[in-house]
Image: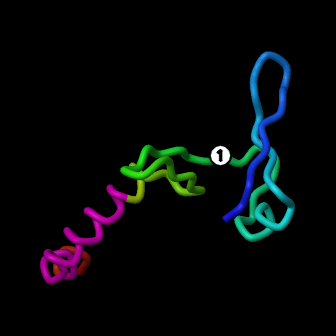
Amino acid sequence: MHKLQLTEAGDSLAVVFPEEMLARLQLKVGDKLYLTEAPDGFLVTVRNPRYQRKLKALRATMKKWRTVLRELAR
């Protein structure tokens, strides 16, 4: 678990991430993070959860219709 610190940034608040965490997440200035409410708190991710759900549904559809898609590709 990592402790994050809030700091003032103009009229807003900013979260300060430790360098070790930034390196592990491969984050740099301007990257986006996604905050999702979870049953036991919040989840911060580098991937868009909506996109991930859509991608999972697409993969299931592609698996189901694999033979048809192969034939159409020919």
Residue 12 or 58: which is nearer the viewer?
12
Residue 38 image offset from top left, x and y in percent: 41, 50
Residue 48 image offset from top left, x and y in percent: 49, 51
Q: Is residue 12 left or right of residue 33?
A: right
Residue 51 or 74: which is nearer the viewer?
51
Position above or below: 19 against 69: above
Q: Label 1: which residue?
A: 32
Position above or below: 69 against 27: below
Residue 28 or 74: which is nearer the viewer?
28
Mark 1, other Cα within 10 Å: few <14 / some 14–19 / many ≥20: few
Residue at 14 percent of width and 76 percent of height: 64
Residue at 79 percent of width and 52 percent of height: 17
Residue 70 or 33: which is nearer the viewer?
33
Residue at 74 percent of width and 70 percent of height: 24
Q: Main secondary structure of the magenta part?
A: helix
Q: Quadrant of residue 19?
A: bottom right
Residue at 75 percent of width and 49 percent of height: 4
Q: How many marks?
A: 1
Q: Secondary structure at mark 1?
A: loop
| Membership of 64 in magenta stretch | yes
Q: Is residue 38 left or right of residue 8?
A: left
Residue 43 image offset from top left, x and y in percent: 51, 52
Question: In which quadrant will I find the C terminus?
Answer: bottom left
Position above or below: 26 against 43: below
Residue 32 image offset from top left, x and y in percent: 65, 46
Q: Which residues are magenta?
A: 53-70
Badge 1 amino acid: Lys
